Image: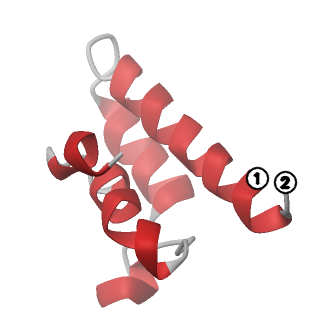
Amino acid sequence: MDGQQRLTVLMLALCAIRDHLMAEDPAALERIKELHLINKFQQGELRYRLLPTQADRTAFKACADSTSAAAAGL
């Protein structure tokens, strides 16, 4: 596994942790999202802290943004 794959797995794990904690700690959603997944001061694709390959990008962005497309793309 190369570095890009390791970072992608780590980011997806953070998405899963964020989603799991939402019921117990709703503030966890924004805290994890803004600290680790996105840069809220950037626009477009520059706001993501990681951009996987083009083939996986849509699914990853949906997961990082907590949209329902994440389930369909992954």
Q: In x, y percent, where is residue 70? A: 26, 47
| Residue visible at 58% across and 50% down in the picture | 11
* Foreground pick, 43 / 58: 58
Instruction: Give the answer, above or below, for where 46 lies relative to 16.
Output: below
Q: Secondary structure at mark 2?
A: loop
Q: Which residue is mark 2?
A: 1
Image quarter of residue 49: bottom right
Q: How is the image coloured?
A: secondary structure
**Can residue 42 be seen by looking at this rendering?**
no
Q: Which residue is mark 1?
A: 6
Q: Residue furthest front?
A: 55
Dot 1 or dot 2: first in sequence order is 2
Left or right placement of residue 73 versus residue 41 in this view: left
Q: Seen in the image, is 41 located left or right of residue 26?
A: right
Label 1 close to label 2 by CB (< 8 Å): yes
Q: Residue at x 56, y 55 (%)?
A: 36
Question: Of all residues shown, which one is farthest toward the left?
Answer: 68
Q: Amino acid at mark 2?
A: Met
Which SS class for mark 1?
Answer: helix
Image coords of residue 68 (percent x, y): 14, 44
Residue sticking out furthest to the top: 24
Residue drawn where x is 45% and y is 30% of the image: 16
Spatial distance from mark 1 to mark 2, Cα to Cα? 7 Å
Q: Nearer the viewer, mark 1 or mark 2?
A: 2
The type of residue carrying mark 1 is Arg
Residue found 40% across the figure and 59% down from its top:
60
Other residues around mark 1 within 10 Å, as few (<14) / some (14–19) / many (≥20): few
Is there any visible trace of residue 14 in the rendered image?
yes
Would you place residue 18 above or below residue 43 in this image?
above
